[in-house]
Structures are given as structure tokens and as C-alpha cells.
Amino acid sequence: MAAALWQNAVMAKKPSVSFRSDLLAEALEKQDMAQVALALRNDRLVVPLAKPAPRDKPTAPGEVWMYRRPEDGRLALLVFSDAKNKPEALPPFVAAQDGAWLHEFLRVHGDEIETVFFDIAGPHPMQADPAELLRVLDLDGGSPPIDPGVVAP
């Protein structure tokens, strides 16, 4: 009995990772790009992995899987609102990421990526230009915030 209680206590301390974003799912259902951007900035997203992080380094990032078009080799990044929306034909591994991660990924690899597909197999697919996503995810905004108490000359 004591062992079962101890095991439950240990298991309860493990942080659970959700592989779903209700905010992103709702934005995709409405087909509202402004809401998609807000969801990406404030919640998580799911990306498929070609290879997961090594077992001895669980916090290391896995290798993101991208679709390569056979005709010209152009890449598409696939993003999902829920791991359940990932087609079974893709690699079985996924990672839960956030908007800061997506911003950095697009900053580094954006020139190679032609498009970003959201929930490509449904239920509410959308497509976005990587440069536009990079712009809306620019968490610094490129300029200092405006103090509402200060009037510009």
C-alpha cells in the first residue's frame, strides 16, 4: 500500500505535456489568421519530428520533419493544433513547441521553407507564408513599447 502511494506521489510530480492547443484549434476552425497569430504567440503548437530527442538528453530538441516537394525540393513546415491531427503516414514522433520556438525556427530556416501548413489533413487546414508568420511572431516588435502616459511630440 505504501509503495502504491509513493508511486502515485512520484507520478503526480511529473509535469504533463499537452500535445494540443485549444486556442490554435479554435482559430483554425474560424479560419482567422489574426487569431492564429495570437494563438501561436500565447499557446503551444505541435510539430512532427524525424528523430526524437535522445533518451539521455530529454530536453534537447528533436529533428523537425518537413515535407520536401519532389519536383523542386522546396520545403513545407507542418504545424498541428493537436497531435491527433497528424497524418499517420508521417513519422510517429511529435514535439510540443511555442511561438518563440517557431519564431526562431523560421528565422533560421525560413529561406528554405516555402510555406507553413496548419492541420494539413484537417479538420480545418490553413496555409501561411513563413515571412508573414515571422513578422507576426516578432515578439520584440522591432521597436520599444509605447508608454500610454507619454504623448509623442
Image (cartoon, rainbow, N blue to C red):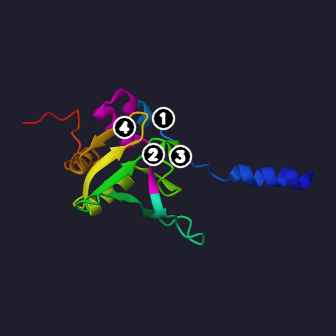
- Which badge, 4 or 1, comes first in the chain's sequence? 1
Q: Amino acid at mark 1?
A: Asp
What is the C-alpha distance between the residues marked 1 and 3? 10 Å
**Residue 140 % position (x, y):** 27, 50
| Residue at the spot 52% in from the left edge and 66% down from the top edge | 53
Residue identified by numbered label 2: 44
Tell whether 143 sits left or right of 61. left
> Which residue is the site of mark 4?
125
- Magenta part of the chain: 27-48
Residue 14 position, x and y percent, is 67, 53
Q: Which mark is residue 22?
A: 1
> Which one is earlier in the sequence, the residue at label 1 or at label 2?
1
The quadrant holding residue 121 is top left
Q: Given this view, does label 4 or label 1 mark the residue nearer the observer?
A: 4
Quote the CA–CA distance across marks 3 and 4.
18 Å
Query: In the rendered structure, which disc, 2 or 3, sits on the residue that comes first in sequence?
Result: 3
Which residue is denoted by mark 3 in the rendering? 19
Q: Please, what is the three-letter code of the amino acid marked with disc 3? A: Phe
Q: Residue at x 38, y 55 (%)?
A: 101
Answer with mark 3 or mark 4, whichever residue precedes in sequence: 3
Is the residue 57 above or below the residue 105 in the image? Answer: below
For image coordinates 14% across by 33% down, the residue present is 151
For the question of whether residue 73 can be seen, the reply is yes
Local SS, label 3: loop
